[in-house]
Image (cartoon, helix red, strand yellow):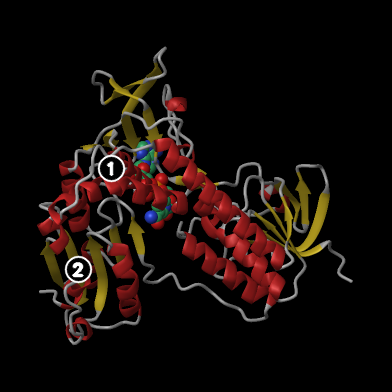
Amino acid sequence: MSKYDYDLFVIGAGSGGVRAARVSSSYGAKVAIAEEYRVGGTCVIRGCVPKKLLVYGSHFSEELEDGKNFGWTWENPKFDWIKLRDHILSDVDRLNNAYTDTLNSHDVEIILERAEIVGPHEIKLASGKTVTAKYILVAVGAWPAVAEFPGSEHMLTSNDMFHLENLPETVIVSGGGYIANEFAGIFNGLGSNVTLVNRSDVILRGYDESLRDRLIQISTAKGINIKLNCTFDKIEKRDDGALDVYMNGDNPVRADVVLAATGRRPKTDGLGLENAGVETNDYGAIKVDEYSRTNVDSIYAVGDVTDRVQLTPVAIREGQAFAETVFNDTPKTVDYDCIPSAVFSQPPIASVGLTESEARKKYGDVKIYSSDFRAMRNVFADRPERSLYKMIVEVTSEKILGLHMIGPDAPEILQAAAVAVKAGLTKQAFDDTIALHPSMAEELVLLK
Ligand code: NDP
């Protein structure tokens, strides 16, 4: 008989926590998982999944337009925000149930309450009950960071975007990262008037410069107003509910919604980490070693709360590695090298490996191959939008250091190509592969 109530107590039923819980349970551990909101976490409930569905929904406006040259006509096509919103929310319910079923079928006890740490092996639930566990895994994720200035409380975050009562006529997006560009594309596609405002002169810091420039060019052509080097002075709410937004000392601009998309902070406030002496960094992120173990032997942390790489598949890998290490006697670490990522802007960006400037910094000289082309479908539809694929290779070996793409379906294509980059293949290996014609992906084996 164990002296603890559980072998493992997981706090947070998001992607990382659910994976760790169910795999640990399958290795024989007695596991409970606490969740204060809904099983599924950010990705499923208010992130990747509903966001991607909004991207699909908004892109139909272009499909309808492009259909004309393909012989299709539609009489008065109309968009119904409430219909899309509610259908997405019901899909979120479906996934919430599926995640719950998975935990149940793996004998993980689900406790729908907030949990806080009171000691290295002790957790207090919102109901007041205290439970003990041999190991505690913190997987509480991150939360939107909202800048503070007069009226900033009137801004909404990505959490709110899935519940809007109306499609806003005018949206101002604060930020130039993933969420800002994805929602700018969504609302632009749905017909809102969109302005994206970023404090610096770059968007999507960390992505290859050529792709960022291409996205700015295409987004601007689609009607998204991009204001760089711009900061918010204040926001005032009018009697009619609209917002007067003051930026850069200029006259106010009216907006229905101001979306704060300025990063996500680890959600460690009030978690009781100090009760067990768990160390965090200046950003509030839990410090962990390569096995996701904190400075307290019995407490581990995975996912966004550790602020290593804020991506769902990474949290899942970390959760799996935790279960292998702690409950399957097979110590496992996560390989953070060459993680593919995508921005679901319109068109999307997908990327793996080093950007050109990172590669030049690391290797000095590098070779760049690229293809700047208009997809056949866009040519036929009279859509001027051009795609850009860019490969960065080491000079002597021609080993691929980075692969970057912007264009329709770029994430779908890059996932497969990322296998080759991760495997350390060369440009020659791509050249040796016969093109699959006609496709956009064939440009990858025809890069000049
Ligand atoms: P990002 O880190 O992508 O971008 C943050 C943006 O906000 C940057 O443009 C930054 O400007 C700006 N910013 C940061 N702090 C401030 C501040 N105090 N005041 C004003 N502007 C500020 O964050 P997101 O919120 O877009 O997304 C959070 C994370 O979620 C991402 O890092 C990503 O890991 C994940 N995510 C992943 C997605 C995907 O995989 N497709 C989709 C959505 C989110 P600057 O760069 O100029 O400093």
Q: Residues within 10 Å of mark 2 (few under 14, many from 20)?
A: many
Hey, which residue is sitting farthest top in the picture? Answer: 239
Instruction: Say which amino acid is labelled 2.
Output: Met
Q: Position of residue 12 (x, y in %)?
A: 63, 53
Looking at the image, is mark 1 or mark 2 earlier in the sequence? 1
Residue closer to the observer: 329 or 96: 96
In this orientation, does residue 344 appear? Answer: yes
Quadrant in the picture for residue 349: bottom left
Q: Which mark is residue 112?
A: none
Judged left or right of residue 118, residue 268 is left
Image quadrant for the C terminus? bottom left
Of 353 and 154, which appears nearest the observer? Answer: 154
Image quarter for residue 278?
A: bottom right
Whether residue 299 is visible here, answered yes or no, is no
* Residue 104 position in % (x across, y down): 71, 62
* Disc 1 residue type (three-letter): Gly
